[in-house]
Image: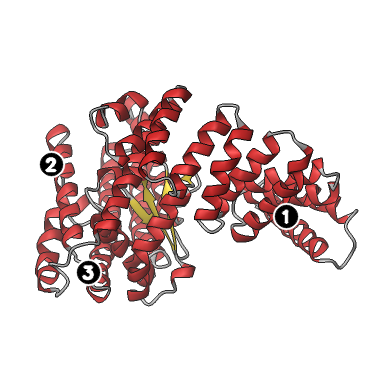
Amino acid sequence: MGQSVFSRFRAAFMLRALIALIAALSITAQPVAAQSILRDAETEAFLKEISAPLVVAAGLQPGNVDIILIGDKSINAFVAGGQAVYIHSGLIETADNANEVQGVIAHELGHITGGHIIRFGEGARGATGITLLSLLLGAAAMAAGSADAGMGVIMAGQQAALGKFLAFNRVQEASADAAGVSFLEKAGISGKGMLSFFLKLKQEEYRYASTYAAVDPFMQTHPMSGERESTLSADVLRSPAYGKKTDPAIEERFKRIKAKLIGYMDDPTSALRKYPERDQSAPAHYARAYAWHRGAYPDKAAEEVAKLVAISPEDPYFRELQGQILLESGKPREALAPLRMAVKGTRGSPLISSLLGHALLATDDPENLTEARDVLKVAVSRDRDNPFAWFTLGMAYSRLGDEPRAQLATAERYALLGNTRLAMASAEAAMSRIPRGTPDYIRAEDIALSARAEASDKKRR
């Protein structure tokens, strides 16, 4: 007898699933591409500061390692190639203190020093081999008329392949744990936060298990958190740094970072519930200011910022938020003074400088154009990976009548956004009007050549 309609459908479904699994195991994932990177001067400075001693302990250069914030409410952190650690905003919201975040960063640095992203293919190749073999055997059984037997072979192979891959991944995670503990100890930072954060992960596992089903420890990408805690506890407790407390000033800054993230990322109603009016601390004012601003209540947001400024008039990040709220409320001229204070207080933070440049342009005052251009030129020289700053600089050049450099700034922006066609067109337009051999001409030529090569690669693929 031939296969039933249901059997044929089920077999086709399994084949498609296996092909998808092979594809997933055969290439390195790029999780950052589909996620939103959050840029905030205060948060970036804080993450850089608390990670610096760990980076040094790991044998890396602080200037070469980036700690990047992802706007995602899930509790996660990862590395994705290069020397960059990506942290979800949800992880910071979940952490109780800065030391817990340091524990996560130490673990992720363990992945970097262990070359785990590069070695990803080793685990994938072993799993793919099992998958392909089971696919061939299963297909042969189906061709012989035994759909159920064929599916059994395929499903068993899929399970074995996935199990092999996850086992490989768990070894890497355990290795990163051990490296992270050593980095914390070498940096003189307590590993207490690493253990307490694992306890949070264990509670998440229990919640997942009670909601869905028992968690199979052999089908996890990470070792079970309880197991990790047990394995690491002895090493962490033996460390001379175990009882060392984090600098209270760092913990206070962490509270601010967490509050502003909640105010920015949470629904305004939820943020206001977490930080009610009776809480008159600086973090609470911070959270409510962002929540009211996001909820389109500029006057209430301004009231909260005024209270922050009263607490610390020289704080550059309070002044940055004050200027941002004024600018986005249609008061760019009033935003200039606090933004200039913020730029000065942060010694020229490129993110805040680009905001000041935007405010200067938004005044529509020709007398502010030269200052806007100069501020933005410094901003992009310190942080070239800011598309908005390049866009604003292009506007400044254009209003000053310097179209060739406006086109070059536009080319820089499109190159960052991955739009090779417009990057090449803008760069070539700039080259046609910028003197040959000058630094700006050479930069435009580099963008055009790079965009052309990338376009050719896409065509070949």
At mark 3, the secondary structure is helix
> Which residue lies under the disc numbered 2?
206
Give the residue type that dot 1 points to. Ala
* Quarter of the figure with residue 222: bottom left
Query: Disc 1 to disc 3, how far (Cα)?
Result: 43 Å
Residue at the image point whose x is 38% and y is 62% from the top: 49
Please determine whether, in this image, residue 452 is positioned above or below residue 333.
below
Q: Which residue is nearer to you in this view: 31 or 369?
A: 369
Label 1 CA crowd tier, 10 Å (few <14, some 14–19, many 20+): many
* Quarter of the figure with residue 437: bottom right
Give the residue type that dot 3 points to. Val
> Which residue lies under the disc numbered 1?
451
In contact (CB < 8 Å): disc 3 and disc 2:
no
Q: Position of residue 446 (x, y in %)?
A: 75, 62
Residue at the image point whose x is 18% and y is 63% from the top: 245
Please determine whether, in this image, residue 271 is positioned above or below residue 225.
above
Query: Disc 3 to disc 2, how far (Cα)?
Result: 25 Å
> Which residue lies under the disc numbered 3?
181
The numbered mark at residue 440 is none
- In terms of sequence position, does the residue under pointer 1 or pointer 2 come before the other? 2
Q: Position of residue 66 (x, y in %)?
A: 45, 61
Residue 36 seen anywhere in this rendered image of the structure: no
Q: Which residue is nearer to you in this view: 138 or 329?
A: 329
Please determine whether, in this image, residue 169 is positioned above or below residue 216.
below
In contact (CB < 8 Å): disc 1 and disc 2:
no
Q: Looking at the image, is mark 3 or mark 2 nearer the viewer?
A: 3
Residue at the image point whose x is 37% and y is 29% from the top: 9
Describe residue 106's horizontal placement relative to residue 71 as left or right. Answer: left
Q: Which residue is nearer to you in this view: 250 or 80?
A: 250
At mark 2, the secondary structure is helix
At mark 1, the secondary structure is helix
* Quarter of the figure with residue 263: top left
